[in-house]
């Protein structure tokens, strides 16, 4: 495979400097680029090239070779230079067209796979690690569009987030929702470095709810007060597209009749309609 071919180029047909160091020549590198990396057969967007265009890839191979052949020897690439080239964007398997949205984003939301996070709140293993609201910020800034929140009863009438049946630490539900509200979407008109991978496509909150009725009411109040207009008004499912739902938060969980009544009462006390809780049904829970 690639490793045997590249090592062979250094040990076999490459030039050898005065100090005994091996170099990969441009001829050997072009052969590696074409045969092992298939760069003579595919363009930068994954499309197959016709034979007449392969010379373009030879020119690109020469350019890559020259960019990393920076030593004073100029005999060829050292092992270190070759490794740096392989780890660079010049050799990335990521197609350039995937750097931007290239798919049809106007289909119903259920037609898409969603980049999802499991037990998002945990900083380490699922048995003994700490919970932190910063993990939600981290996941959302990395581009995750579905995060999980396991909610239980906590002290002082406040719902808590932690991993059930384990000694993991907990954080308040309010602090989690606050972190999500602050990090779910990039600031308007601003592409700050910290938001380089953030998206304005909808965020789904996958809630595993273990709270008694009074705390469920408290959860509804928190969602309404913290997220406000970001909550998407839905009660029976989502038929809108990701494009339609930009900047919106959807709450996913088991929709039981008593819970719907709780949300309705809570929303009424907040001067809002229950549809302000972006709540869609979920057939089952997780761990």
Image: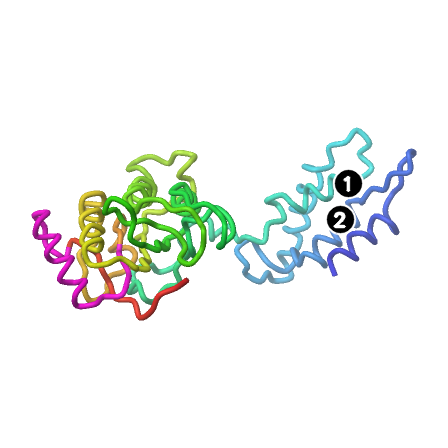
Nearer the observer, 240 or 267: 267
Quadrant location, the C terminus: bottom left
Q: Secondary structure at mark 2?
A: helix
Quadrant location, the N terminus: bottom right
Q: Residue at x 39, y 59 (%)?
A: 114
Of marks 2 and 1, which one's residue comes earlier in the chain? Answer: 2
Which residue is the site of mark 1?
Answer: 77
Q: Can you name the residue that lies furthest to the top here?
A: 72
Nearer the observer, 39 or 171: 171
Instruction: Tell me: residue 169, above or below residue 126.
Output: above
Q: Position of residue 20 (x, y in %)?
A: 91, 38
Which residue is the site of mark 2?
Answer: 29
What's the magenta region?
250-275
Nearer the observer, 275 or 88: 275
Q: Residues within 10 Å of mark 1 (few under 14, many from 20)?
A: many
Q: CA distance from mark 2 to mark 1?
A: 9 Å
Task: Please tell me in which quadrant of the rendered image residue 50 appears.
Answer: bottom right
Q: Residue at x 28, y 37 (%)?
A: 188
């Amino acid at each position: 495979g690639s490793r045997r071919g590249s090592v062979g180029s250094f040990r076999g047909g490459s030039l050898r400097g005065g100090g005994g160091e091996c170099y990969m020549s441009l001829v050997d590198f072009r052969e590696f680029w074409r045969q092992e990396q298939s760069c003579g057969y595919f363009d930068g967007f994954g499309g197959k090239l016709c034979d007449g265009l392969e010379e373009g890839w030879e020119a690109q191979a020469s350019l890559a070779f020259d960019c990393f052949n920076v030593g004073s020897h100029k005999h060829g690439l050292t092992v270190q230079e070759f490794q740096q080239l392989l780890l660079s964007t010049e050799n990335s398997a990521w197609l350039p067209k995937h750097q931007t949205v290239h798919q049809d984003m106007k289909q119903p939301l259920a037609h898409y796979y969603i980049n999802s996070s499991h037990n998002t709140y945990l900083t380490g293993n699922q048995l003994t690690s700490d919970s932190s609201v910063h993990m939600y910020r981290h996941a959302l800034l990395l581009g995750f569009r579905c995060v999980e929140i396991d909610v239980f009863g906590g002290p002082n009438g406040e719902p808590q987030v932690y991993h059930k049946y384990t000694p993991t630490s907990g954080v308040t539900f309010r602090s989690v929702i606050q972190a999500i509200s602050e990090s779910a979407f990039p600031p308007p008109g601003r592409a700050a470095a910290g938001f380089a991978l953030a998206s304005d496509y909808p965020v789904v909150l996958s809630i595993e709810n273990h709270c008694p009725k009074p705390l469920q009411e408290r959860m509804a109040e928190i969602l309404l007060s913290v997220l406000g207009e970001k909550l998407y008004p839905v009660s029976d499912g989502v038929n809108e597209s990701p494009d339609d739902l930009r900047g919106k938060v959807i709450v996913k969980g088991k929709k039981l009749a008593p819970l719907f009544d709780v949300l309705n009462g809570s929303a009424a006390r907040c001067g809002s309609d229950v549809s302000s809780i972006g709540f869609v049904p979920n057939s089952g829970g997780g761990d």
